[in-house]
């Protein structure tokens, strides 16, 4: 391997060096500083005689005398089942004082795209135990469903709650056609319910947030079946662009070689995108919207699209990326491009949070695109779709009436309108607000739904099949006597 | 060049630089838009810029580890598709590589450097001549048919570039796509397979004004904003507003002979859904499998960006081929924004001067070139065929003022605006009736008058007026509440609610409701109008509005969409409405 001491330019996270042999695009580079410290980087552009290198650990300390070594290969992640229970840094090196990792294989971190023809359409219901998700925006195996949040909101608590509670209920699983022999739960699996392996990739989160995650993982014993990648706020920004790829390469190995059902949590995608922008700016690229690179959609897609199921394979990758929307604005390029790639989104909302609701999920704009495939008879329950539609419609009506209530007051509204207003309040306080430590089965969630819907006279429930109303409607619920023509 | 030909490779250069999908080669003697093979692995690419000795190539595959000094070979031919029987019921990537073949060659993940022909070269098709020896044939004239699928007869044509001649021999029997089925006196051999460069429109005789609707089975589209066969439409909407569901409904139910569905830079799971669902679903026209008339092009968002740029051209070239045979083709591109972004990405790597929002200055030109390839045509062979192009647009942040939406709106004549508010209320299809328009209405009205009902245009206008009025009233309701309105306005709100819930809303997941024939579309609307007329008569007779809106026959309108045998129910509702209302005065 040749060593060069030919650095001609250092600019932001980029280093330019002259070379006299062809260097492959995306190849890994080691830069040894005069002090003996080694930094790693990746070839961003390779020309005859000159390469530009993006340095993961930051360029400080690099001078013209630093030596550059090209390793002749693209970035690889050593993968093995033994990674479960380990904590790694953002570049994939262990930081938990554990034993050395003996890899089964070293895999290219730029994963190949799954052939759409080889995919299996996700349809297995995952019970997260959170009503706002299970009832209204159901998650299924192989889906990518991000949390759209804002700074200072408890999205981490929600992510942890999902990671802790996510199961595929036994009888549902038997009913689902696709799962022949899912992995039995390891550790303290309850009643043979399937457990997930969790791959957790932190990008630029603070040490405190990281501690929160780690403590929860340790407390609940989840760490044993987790692989943790930590790129913290004070770690180099450029490293953030590789962290999720390392994590997803690991997840792909666990899912499609070791047949785990893997839940990947990526937090915080906003920091990842900032890192992309930083590199783009340093390369003097033509910027797209708000200075983010024009290829950000493609780049994000190469991460998010690594979720899914493959026909004939038992494992799956389900992704929950978390992003904090700058200024709570969902038209900002990061949430916007994410929403166009992912299969829905869950909004973590500031107003709901200030009302004290836990988790503060704002239901109307939230969406799970795969919900229809994963719910209904044999999957969850026959009334699931109708109940969810009716709750959506009633809550939307209640929200509309709230603005009217602000103007004319409650007294000026009809009894039915008042019921809608009460419904909207109770929907938030009882259906959504369940607490971060409460786990609800899908039956419990639907029961709460019916309790709330039974506030209305039967005729008002126009989105629910009449037979289902007969079966589930609470006849004895407290109701204001409603007469349309009083 | 297409995947099927083994062309002599000429002119070899070497790579000077690599940056993502853009590779610069030196020493290459090649023409603009020619296909080249890049590097030791022979990755497929296309020449997009020539400057002095430096030739810029966009590569259709991942370029990791490709290094300067590696060879670049040109094929001397532009990017082309293979045209011939076998395209229906196929799933291709953006450069017409069949995805099922790729899976069998390299497993579940897409590796690189693998080629596969777009049509099966070994399969034999039963060819039946439609010309006889001694007949004169010209370019694109049909010489025979093969049964491509149970639905589609594939008409084998003389290539457009041919000079024509007299048929010397023509053979019936089973042949592969490369066997000559007819020989002309000029010595020209006609095979089932043709090649055509994707960036060039296939020639036609004349573009005509479309006068027949493309029936979509969607009430709001057929009823209020119809698209013509040979027309162009855009569906813009923010994420989560139902673009893909709408596109898929159209692909399933549109009364076109052929459907070309391009998944351009969209979700892998969505394409999988189409791949899994379509073979199971019956075509409403023939009852055969939907795939028997469908060609899918799936270039998902994580597949190489250059192939995304080319996939819309691959799709429309295939569509043109079937149009030449005399078929009505519907082409859906989901989403054209991803295509535009692919252009932007390549353009920025070329360091071109950017136009609006970083898009290349030629964005508008490329979009209009694409949509202009749609239309109702008289073909060279005298047959008539059409391509209806329906492009989804994904405006960032749902802001319709962005360049892709605006440039598309300048071209298309049908605009189906999706609305996030409606989607959040689970009003689907979430097409906003105030913002949407169709410029085909007037030219299609005669068809609807002749084939459905004579007062189709008037009934539609009544619905539009009522909805407009509701829009204005809602603003007042937001301020003072519904009860403060006078009775007639409250009744209008009630009628408009039925229009929205019984007519405009349509459940794409319900077995019956997902497809609504135009006769049913008309009947539902006319039932609501009957209720409206009877109700206003009752109001004039002094019946209080609460009593009118309280009759139990009217809510049955809401279940008409999901009723299979709707005609007796429409009649019964109309009778009951009249009876119950007349009983009030």
Image (tube, rainbow, N blue to C red):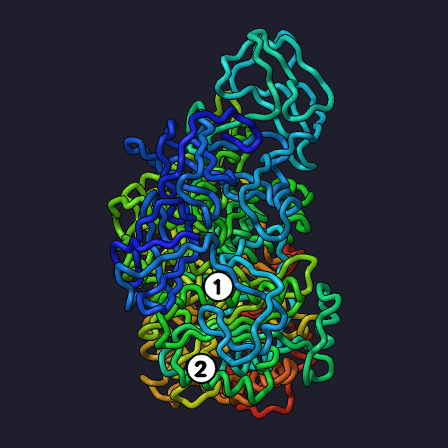
Rendered view: B464 above or below B43: below
Q: Which residue is mark 1?
A: A245
Q: Determine whether label 1 and label 2 are within 8 Å by CB.
A: no
The residue that appears at 54% across and 84% down in the rendered structure is A217
Rendered view: B541 above or below B82: below
Residue at mark 1: chain? A
Q: Which mark, by number, is residue B61?
A: none
Q: Return the x and y of residue B583 as percentages of the image width and height.
A: 56, 71
Q: How many marks?
A: 2
Rendered view: B363 above or below A109: above
Q: Return the x and y of residue B143 as percentages of the image width and height.
A: 62, 19
Q: Return the x and y of residue A5 as percentages of the image width and height.
A: 31, 55
Q: Which residue is mark 2?
A: A210
Residue A346 visible to the viewer:
no
- The alpha-carbon separation of the residues under discs 1 and 2 comes to 19 Å
Q: Front-most of A459 and B249?
A: B249
Q: Which of marks 2 and 1 precedes in the sequence?
A: 2
Badge 1 density bin: few <14, some 14–19, many ≥20, Cα 10 Å = many
Residue B58 visible to the viewer:
yes
Instruction: Determine whether the residue tagged by mark 1 lies in a helix, strand or loop.
Output: helix
Q: Return the x and y of residue B49 as percentages of the image width and height.
A: 33, 36
């Amino acid at each position: 391997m040749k060593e060069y001491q030919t650095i001609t330019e250092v600019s932001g996270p980029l280093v330019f060096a002259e070379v006299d042999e062809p260097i492959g695009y995306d190849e890994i580079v080691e830069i040894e500083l005069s002090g003996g410290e080694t930094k790693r980087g990746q070839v961003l552009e390779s020309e005859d005689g000159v390469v530009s290198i993006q340095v993961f650990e930051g360029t400080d300390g690099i001078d013209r005398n630093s030596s550059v070594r090209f390793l002749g290969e693209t970035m690889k992640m050593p993968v093995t089942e033994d990674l479960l229970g380990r904590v790694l840094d953002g570049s994939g090196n262990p930081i938990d004082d554990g034993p050395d990792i003996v890899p089964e294989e070293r895999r290219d971190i730029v994963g190949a795209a799954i052939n759409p023809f080889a995919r299996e359409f996700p349809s297995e219901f995952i019970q997260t135990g959170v009503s706002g998700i299970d009832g209204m925006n159901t998650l299924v195996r192989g889906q990518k469903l991000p949390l759209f949040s804002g700074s200072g909101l408890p999205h981490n608590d929600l992510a942890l709650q999902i990671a802790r509670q996510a199961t595929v209920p036994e009888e549902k699983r038997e009913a689902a056609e696709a799962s022949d022999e899912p992995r039995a739960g390891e550790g303290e699996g309850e009643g043979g319910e399937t457990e997930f392996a969790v791959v957790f990739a932190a990008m630029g989160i603070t040490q405190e947030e990281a501690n929160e995650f780690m403590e929860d993982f340790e407390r609940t014993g989840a760490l044993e079946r987790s692989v943790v990648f930590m790129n913290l706020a004070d770690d180099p920004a450029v490293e953030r662009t590789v962290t999720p790829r390392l994590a997803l390469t690991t997840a792909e190995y666990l899912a499609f070689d070791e047949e785990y059902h893997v839940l990947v949590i990526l937090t915080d995608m906003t920091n990842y995108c900032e890192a992309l922008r930083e590199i783009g700016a340093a390369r003097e690229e033509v910027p797209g919207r708000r200075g983010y690179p024009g290829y950000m959609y493609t780049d994000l897609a190469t991460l998010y699209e690594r979720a899914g199921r493959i026909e004939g394979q038992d494992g799956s990758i389900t992704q929950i990326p978390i992003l904090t929307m700058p200024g709570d604005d969902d038209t900002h390029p990061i949430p916007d491009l994410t929403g166009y790639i992912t299969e829905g989104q869950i909004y973590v909302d500031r107003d709901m949070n200030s009302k004290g609701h836990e988790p503060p999920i704002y239901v109307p704009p939230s969406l799970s695109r795969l919900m229809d495939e994963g719910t209904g008879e044999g999957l969850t329950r026959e009334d699931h779709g109708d109940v969810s539609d009716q709750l959506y419609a009633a809550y939307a009506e209640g929200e509309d009436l709230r603005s009217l209530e602000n103007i004319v007051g409650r007294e000026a509204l009809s009894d039915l309108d008042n019921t809608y207003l009460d419904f909207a309040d109770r929907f938030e306080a009882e259906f959504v607000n369940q607490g971060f430590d409460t786990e609800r089965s899908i039956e419990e969630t639907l029961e709460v739904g019916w309790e709330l819907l039974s506030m209305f006279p039967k005729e008002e429930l126009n989105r629910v099949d009449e037979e289902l109303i007969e079966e589930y409607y609470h006849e004895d619920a407290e109701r204001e006597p409603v007469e349309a023509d009083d | 060049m297409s995947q099927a030909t083994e062309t002599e490779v000429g002119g070899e250069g070497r790579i000077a630089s690599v940056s993502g999908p853009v590779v610069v080669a030196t020493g290459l003697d090649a023409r603009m838009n020619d296909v080249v093979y890049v590097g030791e692995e022979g990755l497929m690419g296309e020449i997009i810029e020539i400057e002095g000795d430096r030739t810029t190539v966009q590569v259709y595959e991942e370029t990791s580890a490709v290094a300067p000094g590696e060879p670049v070979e040109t094929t001397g031919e532009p990017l082309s598709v293979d045209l011939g029987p076998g395209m229906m019921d196929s799933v291709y990537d953006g450069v017409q590589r069949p995805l099922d073949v790729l899976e069998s060659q390299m497993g579940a993940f897409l590796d690189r450097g693998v080629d596969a022909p777009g049509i099966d070269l070994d399969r034999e098709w039963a060819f039946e001549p439609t010309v006889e020896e001694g007949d004169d044939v010209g370019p694109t004239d049909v010489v025979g048919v093969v049964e491509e699928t149970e639905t589609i007869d594939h008409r084998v044509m003389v290539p457009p570039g041919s000079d024509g001649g007299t048929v010397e021999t023509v053979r019936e029997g089973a042949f592969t796509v490369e066997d000559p089925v007819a020989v002309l006196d000029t010595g020209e051999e006609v095979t089932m397979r043709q090649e055509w460069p994707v960036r060039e429109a296939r020639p036609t005789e004349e573009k005509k004004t479309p006068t027949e609707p493309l029936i979509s089975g969607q009430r709001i589209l057929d009823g209020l904003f119809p698209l013509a066969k040979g027309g162009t439409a855009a569906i813009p909407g923010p994420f989560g507003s139902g673009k893909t569901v709408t596109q898929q409904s159209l692909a399933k139910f549109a009364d076109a002979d052929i459907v070309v569905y391009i998944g351009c830079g969209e979700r892998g799971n969505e394409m999988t859904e189409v791949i899994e669902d379509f073979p199971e679903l019956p075509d409403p026209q023939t009852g055969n499998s939907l795939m028997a008339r469908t060609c899918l092009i799936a270039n998902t968002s994580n597949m190489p960006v250059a192939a995304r740029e080319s996939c819309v051209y691959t799709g429309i070239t295939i569509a043109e081929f079937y149009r030449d045979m005399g078929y009505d083709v519907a082409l859906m591109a989901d989403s054209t924004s991803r295509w535009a972004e692919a252009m932007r990405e390549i353009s920025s790597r070329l360091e071109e001067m950017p136009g609006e929002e970083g898009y290349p200055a030629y964005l508008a030109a490329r979009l209009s070139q694409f949509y202009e390839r749609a239309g109702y045509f008289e073909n060279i062979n005298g047959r008539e065929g059409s391509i209806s192009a329906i492009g989804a647009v994904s405006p960032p942040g749902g802001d319709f003022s962005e360049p892709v939406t605006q440039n598309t709106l300048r071209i298309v004549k049908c605009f189906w605006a999706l609305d996030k508010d409606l989607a959040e209320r689970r009003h689907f299809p979430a097409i906003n009736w105030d913002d949407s328009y169709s410029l085909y209405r007037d030219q299609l009205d005669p068809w609807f008058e002749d084939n459905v009902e004579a007062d189709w245009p008037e009934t539609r206008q009544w619905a539009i007026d009522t909805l407009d009025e509701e829009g204005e009233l809602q603003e007042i309701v937001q301020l003072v509440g519904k009860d403060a309105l006078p009775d007639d306005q409250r009744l209008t709100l009630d009628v408009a609610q039925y229009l929205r819930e019984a007519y405009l809303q349509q459940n794409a997941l319900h077995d019956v409701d997902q497809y609504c024939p135009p006769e049913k579309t008309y009947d539902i609307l006319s039932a609501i109008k009957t209720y409206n007329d009877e109700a206003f008569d009752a109001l004039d007779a002094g019946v209080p509005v609460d009593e009118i809106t309280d009759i139990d026959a009217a809510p049955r309108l809401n279940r008409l969409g999901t009723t299979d045998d709707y005609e007796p129910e429409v009649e019964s509702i109309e009778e009951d409405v009249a009876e119950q209302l007349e009983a009030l005065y």
